[in-house]
Amino acid sequence: MTDSEYRAGKVAVIGRPNVGKSTLLNRLVGHRISITSRKPQTTRYCVPGIVTTDAAQIVFVDTPGFQLEHVSGLNRAMNRAVARSLQGADAVLWVVEALRFGGKDAALQSMVPHGKPLVVAVNKIDRVRDKQMLLPFLSEIAKRLAATAIIPVSAARGTGVDTLVTVLAPLLPPGPRVFGDADITTLNERDLAAELIREQLFRLFGEELPYSCAVEIESFQARQGVRVICAAILVDKESHKPIVIGRRGEKLKEVASKARRSMEDLLGGKVHLEVWVKTRRGWTDDKRTLQRLGFDMDR
Ligand SMILES: Nc1nc2c(ncn2[C@@H]2O[C@H](COP(=O)(O)OP(=O)(O)O)[C@@H](O)[C@H]2O)c(=O)[nH]1
Ligand SMILES: [Mg+2]
């Protein structure tokens, strides 16, 4: 392949909550950079994942599910982030769930910018026992969405994921690679660490609590090859504090030790993690807190 044939660009990954966007991003990149859980709307940031092949360098941008309900400052900031990443993308990867295309999926149609190449990934095909059932679903999707390609995949198993890269690469503009072969994301270690703590909140706590929590890294140092990290979990209600801490601090210990292990996996090397809990009432509507958490509040 000559230099002039090499492709480079951004692909925005969109889809209704819980279809497996973040799982797919992690599978594409080969590392767990975007947090996942069984609960909808785990993802709060646009998480870029870099995939480099002989033919192309693609920055996939995982996005939060677009929020139509609960208009808090946080939700508006998340919506702006999704809109911006769609504008900045060279192509769109729309993830839907096999055999499940409903109103919440259809509502996204108006968000796909006109003229941008669209590829649809039909995810979770590992759950479809009778593969014959897929064919009518795929043709239904083909009728409804003006996609360049519709690819059945399983993000959980890795099926079809390489095909996605092969299909997307020629849709991107020609250009040189911008990142090194080993680069997997443009997020820094501090942000990744905060997200891995948030992931445990989603995995370990009930329905409402994780949505009103945030994580702030208060200090992040490297000492003799060990990353020493102090983090605060912000809760929005005083009554949430004892829940996160748990009896004799057991819950918080579990959060910290699971998050620490994921950090060591992702970052490589030893991590020393201290986590504590702080109440900050109304933080989801507090511009300064949102700014500190990395949301762009200028618009
Ligand atoms: N069976 C199956 N489950 C999946 C697959 N991809 C994702 N999931 C699960 O679907 C849930 C939501 O995944 P997540 O990636 O957080 O979805 P997102 O909200 O679209 O980012 C999690 O419990 C995942 O384990 C898949 O290919 N097969
Ligand atoms: Mg997600």
Image: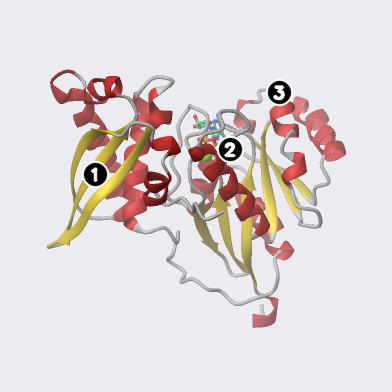
User: Which residue is located at x 69 percent, y 29 percent?
Assistant: 104
x, y percentage for residue 48?
51, 55
In the rendered structure, are the residues bearing label 3 and label 1 in contact, judged by CB atoms less than 8 Å apart?
no
Q: State whether residue 26 appears in this view.
A: yes
Q: Is residue 242 above or below residue 29?
A: above
Disc 3 or 2, which lies upstream in sequence? 2
Residue highlighted by disc 1: 231
**2 or 1: tag closer to the N-terminus:** 2
Residue 21, given in percent of the width and then of the height, sits at 57, 41
Residue on which the image places disc 3: 130
**Residue type pointed to by label 1:** Ala
Task: Look at the numbered disc 2 and say if its residue's Cβ is closer than 8 Å to ligand 1.
Answer: yes
- Image quadrant for the C terminus? bottom right
Position in image of residue 245 (x %, y %): 21, 25
Q: Quarter of the image containing the N terminus?
A: bottom right
User: Residue flagged by tag 2: what amino acid is it?
Assistant: Gly
- Looking at the rendered structure, the secondary structure element under dot 3 is loop
Q: State the image quarter where residue 214 is shown.
A: top left
